[in-house]
Amino acid sequence: MTKEFFSRGFLGRRREVTEAGRLPPGQYLTDGFPVLSAGPTPYTPKDRWDFTVVGAVETPQRWTWDEFQKLPRETVTADIHCVTKWSKFDTRWSGFSLDMLLATAKPQGQYLLAFCDGGYVTNLPLADVTNNKAWIVDTYDGAPLPPEHGGPVRLLIPHLYFWKSAKWVRGLRIVEEDQPGFWESLGYHNYGDPWKEQRYQGD
Amino acid sequence: MTSDEQHLDGNAAGGILGQIFAFEMTTAEVNCANCDAVGPIGAALVYAMAMGTIIRCPSCGEALMRITHGPQRFWIDFSGTRLMQLAATE
Amino acid sequence: MERTALPRRLEWQLGQVVAIVDETPRTRSLLLDVPNWPGHTAGQHVDVRLTAEDGYQAQRSYSIASPPEERNVVLTVERLEDGEVSPYLTEVLQEGDQLELRGPIGGYFTWRVADGGPLLLIGGGSGIVPLMAMLRHRAAQHSAVPARLLYSSRAFEEIIYRQELAQLAAADPTLMVTHTLTRQQPPDWTGYRRRIDRAMLAEVAWPPSEQPQAFVCGPTALVESVASALVDLGHEALRVKTERFGPSGGTA
């Protein structure tokens, strides 16, 4: 019954997609930027903030906020896709390439865990955060990244569902074996390719 | 705990809990596995979004339950709940 | 603890809109005939789900305004400016249309006459809805459980159920209704003209020694400040039940 029912006259808050092939399967285009959180927004004062690359690396790395700000920046414009079916085109960010951050650490494992203030964790293959695919960003749409959207700093990995772009990220732990993170341990897909609609385990 | 605009009260989890469990769950009493506080789910903090429902202990903030809903299945992580007490019909 | 008569899992079902009542310029009540409705308790809510023809869905929660004594399920919806669901429910939905819903939901934020009192109800904006279900239930049962309602609205014209509340209070010496208007007041207004605060609660609510059961409902900011003020005044935290609607004051 409920599968065939539809609400007469309901359109919802969606935008029309004019470019064929730009929207992954099952997604809807939005103008807004929905906030989805599994817990309260964490706040770490900048003088206590740091970002580290640890684990199976040749040289563990640590940057304070000031040290981070001295690193070479990149601007990134990307389409982003949330597993809850909304997509947003041409989002603009500014931050630091993970290639650069990892190069100094020299990873020796094939996977990583991104760990965050508030306890969120997500897992990724190293191959998906290298070769110009991933950034740590502190600026959205020309302004400092707001806390509710992951500020001061979040991951940006546009080629995967946006739950992999972890908010409030504080570091990366390189590991030899893949370990499912927060949502991955709750039935979501371990990899999350929006173009193959890999939303849940078994997809 | 600091005030946080983003959470709702335990009732907000009533819908998904009601789809999974036959019993009325917002009055169920739970023991937090992290801090041992006891209270009804109705008094817990609910972070309910399209990705999943996270029910957190109002005393320490740790997740009591994490629930997600995929095609034709639910996943429920109870590891944050040490004990749950429900009214029985007899 | 809640005793469930018959354990069952919630499922989505269809209700039909049998009547529409405009309550204020921005709120509308929907009277629904829900064929397999199992009955409900005052304070419970339903989840409403809208589905577009292409499968796009949006879902929100709405408190039930009708008391358990009424056959129809009544939802009172406030239209939010940037809402996705409330504009549809308050502007597009017509008599005869069907609405998909799931419920009744919630056993924690509920009140029955048998639960006793005194009953302290504090609401802001559309937070009045579940509290109204409780007052309607109380009236339908001709209950003399002492009850006090403190209701915050932005302006006189935006007081939801204004006339019905006035009638209930006029006819019943055991019910006291107090309004506060936070943004605009009519010229002859002698009531409160500010947000609910600790001082107002100290004047309006029972003292903690009376051990009232308190229900607080509305926008997150109001619920948080009222709940902490009540505990600050000495009310037991366990006797203060809250249902927050989220930062925008509604569920959109």
Image (cartoon, coloured by chain):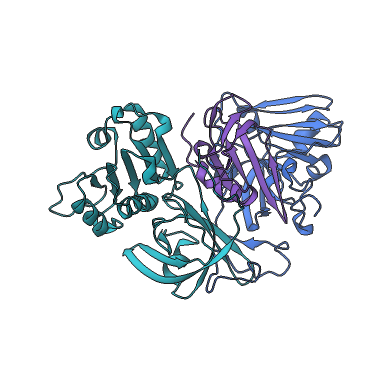
Chain colours: A blue, B purple, C cyan
Residue C148 in the figure: left or right of residue A82: left
Measured from the top left, where is residue C10 in percent x and y? 59, 54
Quadrant of the frame with the C terminus of chain A? bottom right
Res. C150 image quadrant: top left
**Left or right: C201 as drawn, with respect to A64:** left
In which image quadrant can residue C63 be found? bottom left
- The spot of residue A57 in percent (x, y) is 83, 27
Q: Is residue A142 visible?
A: no
What residue is rendered at 42% in x and 64% in y? C71
C104, above or below C17, in the image: above
Farthest residue in the front direction?
B90
Task: Indicate the position of residue C59 as horizontal and vertical percent values.
Answer: 55, 58
Residue furthest left in the image: C188
Residue at left offset 54%, top offset 64%: C36
Question: Front-most of C191 and C95?
Answer: C95
Q: How many marks?
A: 0
* In the image: residue C61, left or right of residue B74: left
Looking at the picture, how far across and down is residue A181, in whole percent? 74, 38
Q: Is residue C153 left or right of residue C224?
A: left
Choose top left, top right, bottom left or bottom right for residue A135: top right
Please tell me which residue is depicted at 29% across the width and 42% down the height of the picture. Answer: C145
In the depicted view, which residue is nearer to us: C25 or A47? C25
Question: A151 above or below B73?
Answer: above
Quadrant housing the N terminus of chain A: bottom right
> Residue C246: in sight, yes or no?
yes
Which is more toward the observer, C122 or A178? Answer: C122
